[in-house]
Amino acid sequence: MAMTSQKIKVAVLGATGAVGQQFIRLLHNHPMFEIAALCASDRSEGKRYDEAVHWILDTDIPAGVRGLALQATDAAMVHSQNPEIRFAFSALPNESAEQAEPAFAKAGMLVFSNASKYRMALDVPLVITEVNHDHLNLLRHQRIARGWAGGIVCNTNCTVSGPALSLKPLHEQFGVKRVFAVSMQAASGAGYPGVASLDLIDNAIPYIKGEEEKLQAETCKLLGTLGNRSINDAAIDVSAHCNRVAVMDGHLVTMSVELATAATPEECAAAMHDWRCAAVAGLPTAPDQPVVVRTEPDRPQPRRDRNTGHGMSAVVGRVRPEPLFGKYGVKFITLAHNTIRGAAGGSVLNAEMVVRKELF
């Protein structure tokens, strides 16, 4: 279907959760998309959205959404009630996404998923738009292989977005061989209500189930190359430690990187600062600068920097030599807003690129 002046009707799955709320905020008055259905758990079915949701964002619930009746997360029912819906933005947890997302794809909708269930499937594109928008072309094979008219496009784990955005220009210019990463992840990454306050206040938790494995595997898929039927992962060794800290929003990740070609910290900082993806230019959710490099010795900081580029830019700081890797080493810190760039905003930008590429 070619781009038209008419807005594309969309559904939001998991609409009452933290990421679902970000989807609603970003999609309200969007120039390409129009919210036509909100889906939630069975216990919320039929309720007005403003009655069922515990709204946690700083902005108000958009007026056009407040009175919408929540629907069950049932693909056949959603399609029958509004067959014009083409896209479904999914903030479902894994246990719900496993059955629901393929059902929406079979019903002809393109699902933009934030769940991890299908990220590593061979025929499912895992995409950060500026990093690997060409991987979206895998949708054509996915539809043939699975026999459905819709499809599934996955957004990356929220911790991976900052590292992947910063590594892309380094990999393009110098090649990346090895990465050692340590995350300090915000409380909102666990959803709402997330981590109990008595566990997190005055504390840091040095374990988040599955996060280290996701950071390691997803980075290599994102920086890989598109094959005929799957992605050829980048040959990068990634080692990660993941920690939960008492910050509301914004995931910090410290990075020690071994390059394939020698480069100074100044050259690395310039590569990240100057990097652009021409293919995203003009898309509504795309930031002007995907990676912003700060020169202050104490930046980035979550409270000060997480909303850079409306929450869609990765912020890098403390770019300096990594003595472990000699002239091939550089280390720095990345910050990305986990519920915007690392979740809802990343998926909306992926959808905008699908429209531009006419892949639906």
Image (cartoon, grey):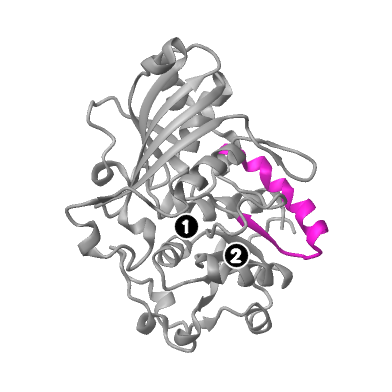
Compare marks 1 and 2 and give the one earlier in the sequence: 2
Helix, strand or loop at label 1? It is helix
> For the point 67% across and 67% down, which residue is it?
102
From the image, give the main secondary structure of the stretch colored magenta. helix
Question: Height in image: 87 above or below 359?
Answer: below
Query: Is label 2 in a helix, a strand or a loop?
Result: loop
Packing grade of label 1 (10 A; few <14, some 14-19, many >=20) is many
- Left of 206 or right of it: where is 89? right
307 magenta-colored = no
Report the residue marked by disc 2: 7
Residue 73 position, x and y percent, is 57, 78
Q: Residues within 10 Å of mark 2 (few under 14, many from 20)?
A: few
Q: Which residues make up the magenta segment?
A: 131-153
Residue 267 falls in image quadrant = top left
Relative to 1, is 308 above or below?
Answer: above
In front here: 212 or 26?
212
Rendered-image quadrant of the N terminus: bottom right
Residue drawn at x 24%, y 57% is 200
Which residue type carries mark 2? Lys
The residue nearer to you, when weighing 39 against 207, is: 207
Name which residue lies at 72% across and 51% down.
123
Quickly name the residue at label 1: 344
Amino acid type, callout 1: Ala
Quarter of the view holding residue 131: top right
* Viewer can see residue 281: no
Q: Quadrant of residue 95?
A: bottom right
